[in-house]
Amino acid sequence: MEIQSEDIIALARSIKHPEYGTDIVSLGMVTDIVVSTSNVVLTLKLVKPNDPFASSLRKALEKAIANQFGHDIVIKVTVQAPVAQAKESPYKTRASVSRVKNIVGIASGKGGVGKSTIAVNLAVAMTQKGFKVGLIDADIFGPSIPKMFGAEQSHPTMIKEGDLELIEPIEQFGVKHLSIGYFVSATDALVWRGPMATNALKQLIHQGAWGELDFLFIDMPPGTSDIHLTLVQELSINGVVIVSTPQDVALADAIKGISMFTGKSINVPVLGLVENMAWFTPEELPDNKYYIFGKDGCKKLAERMRIPLLAQVPIVMGIREGGDNGVPAASGNSAMSQVFANLANNFIVELEKRNKLAPTQKVEISKK
């Protein structure tokens, strides 16, 4: 018995798609029919990706053909699904950081070097120069920003922006900021797997009601991790500031951090180094310097790697007290506030140089 394409189409019309209640021919799913006396070849073209009825429809079609023309013929039905189109989150395209002019990471190779202290005080110093500033605490497992702003008892609220529900940042000392620390108990340890941490961070970034900002600083976790990779994938970061102490152990890790950001796969410019705890100066003896962690370690590293040294910040009790009491040193009129004002000035100079170059692109990770 000679098989005709019209015969296959007639059989296919008897098969309805359960979801649409329409036969698969009318849906345009039966294509590329090739028939002979002993073979039937065709394509079952799915209407949408991941159709749960694809397998059952294929089997029903094969069974109908075999019952009609005999079980000895060779039947080949190829299932073809359309490529799923990735949809941009409305939070990414209509809210989030879309109105932020500059996004800058504050990073360190290791913990304990005062990265968050530098991030908070730099942010405050920038507000004192009249800029609109935001800060995201991306140190998911060790959030300290709420305490440093004296806002541990605060709780961000949800607001509506059109049809979007956004998280309204806490504002202290003129700095809008969000931290995972506002959503968990200060006494609870976060025991999260990587995906949970990165999803929480994405929510702070894209669902925060940041509005129009001149600068959004990201207080990154220490070291090099998947959190860093998430940040450079989610954001077009203008550059990073690396914080280190002058001791060799910290500098070795700082070099790793610099290598990560400047490597070909990430390629985010390093705007400069900040040498924290550069020396100890007793407040009653402001002219005395004691180099507890070594002298000029970051300065020498900056010269060797041809990276600007943005500031050398001494160990002063007032800076530590400001962090513990929630009153950043940069907010006052002390000698320490001038140190952070100078840091802000140098930072602006280096950022302006960087912004004259091509903008940083988000990192694209291809799966092989």
Image (spheres, rainbow, N blue to C red):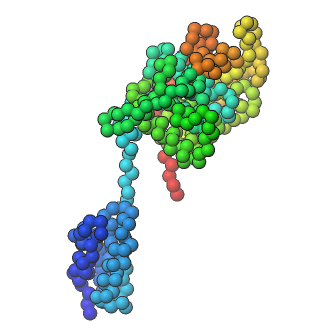
Instruction: Estimate the x, y position of residue 296 in percent, counting from the top left.
Output: 72, 21
- Indicate the quadrant where residue 165 lies: top left
Q: Is residue 215 above or below residue 62?
A: above
Q: Residue at x 52, y 57 (%)?
A: 368
**Residue 346 appears anywhere in the view:** no
Q: Residue at x 26, y 73 (%)?
A: 16
- Indicate the quadrant where residue 130 lies: top left
Instruction: Estimate the x, y position of residue 10 in percent, counting from the top left.
Output: 22, 80
Q: Residue at x 39, y 39 (%)?
A: 91
- Indicate the quadrant where residue 75 lies: bottom left
- Asked whether, in this view, residue 266 is left or right of residue 277, the answer is left
- Asked whether, in this view, residue 192 is left or right of residue 208, the answer is right
- Asked whether, in this view, residue 1 is left or right of residue 238, the answer is left
Q: Residue at x 24, y 78 (%)?
A: 14
Q: How many marks?
A: 0
Query: Which quarter of the rendered picture does the N terminus lie within?
Result: bottom left
Instruction: Estimate the x, y position of residue 344 in percent, counting from the top left.
Output: 55, 18
Q: Is residue 111 above or below residue 131?
A: below
Instruction: Estimate the x, y position of residue 19 in percent, counting from the top left.
Output: 30, 66
In the image, 310 versus 218, the foreground residue is: 218
**Residue 163 appears anywhere in the view:** yes
